[in-house]
Structure formats: structure tokens, C-alpha cells
């Protein structure tokens, strides 16, 4: 649980450096395979990614709203 008002960049990087390194290597390797070696296996249409991203954002928005609604009801009492 986050209890401070401001987060330090060093504390965020301390906990997330492995994930950041993994995704940096993954995206770099896909870029190199696609643009340098002309491997077209990774061609995904943009509208597919956009539709999945929109659906995920709507789903997470409703899920987040359902989690916090009981807390807001307690503040109204």
C-alpha cells in the first residue's frame, strides 16, 4: 500500500528493474527482427491492438469502480 504522497524514481526502479529490462529486451528483439531482418511473422494490424486495449481499459475501469464503491459508501455515512 502506498502511504506517501510522492514516490521517488529510485524506489520505483528498485522494484521494477527486472520487468523493465525484460520488456526492453523483448521490444528491441522484435524491432530488430522486424525491421533489420524483414521477419514479417510479427505483423499485427493496429486496429486489433487498439480494440483489445480499449476493451481492457473499459473492463479495468468498471472493475476499479466496483472495488471502490463500498469505500465511498462508508464515507457518506
Image (spheres, rainbow, N blue to C red):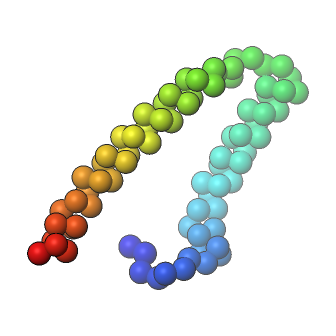
Q: Where does the image place residue 71, in percent across and percent down from the top left?
A: 21, 67
Instruction: Tell me which residue sits at (88%, 27%) in the image.
Output: 36
Numbered disc total: 0
Most extreme residue toward the bottom, as rendered? 4
Residue 16: quadrant of the picture:
bottom right
Report the quarter where the N terminus lies: bottom left
Instruction: Tell me which residue sits at (77%, 40%) in the image.
Output: 28
Please name whichever residue, 68 or 24, is drawn nearer the observer in this view of the structure: 68
Instruction: Tell me which residue sits at (56%, 29%) in the image.
Output: 49
Please, is residue 48 above or below residue 56 in the view? above
Please, is residue 39 above or below residue 20 in the view? above
Most extreme residue toward the front, as rendered? 76
Left or right of residue 47: residue 30 = right
Q: Where does the image place residue 6, in percent across and percent down from the top left?
A: 54, 80
Left or right of residue 68: residue 24 = right
Report the quarter where the C terminus lies: bottom left
Most extreme residue toward the right, as rendered? 36
Q: Is residue 14 visible?
A: no
Left or right of residue 6: residue 45 = right
Q: Where does the image place residue 32, in percent across and percent down from the top left?
A: 82, 32
Most extreme residue toward the top, as rendered? 40
Instruction: Tell me which residue sits at (78%, 33%) in the image.
Output: 31
Amino acid at each position: 500500500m502506498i502511504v506517501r504522497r510522492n514516490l521517488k524514481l529510485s524506489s520505483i526502479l528498485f522494484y521494477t528493474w527486472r520487468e523493465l529490462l525484460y520488456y526492453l529486451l523483448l521490444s528491441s528483439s522484435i524491432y530488430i527482427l522486424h525491421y533489420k531482418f524483414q521477419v514479417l511473422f510479427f505483423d499485427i494490424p493496429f486496429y486489433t491492438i487498439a480494440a483489445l486495449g480499449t476493451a481492457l481499459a473499459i473492463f479495468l475501469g468498471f472493475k476499479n469502480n466496483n472495488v471502490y464503491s463500498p469505500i465511498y459508501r462508508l464515507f457518506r455515512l
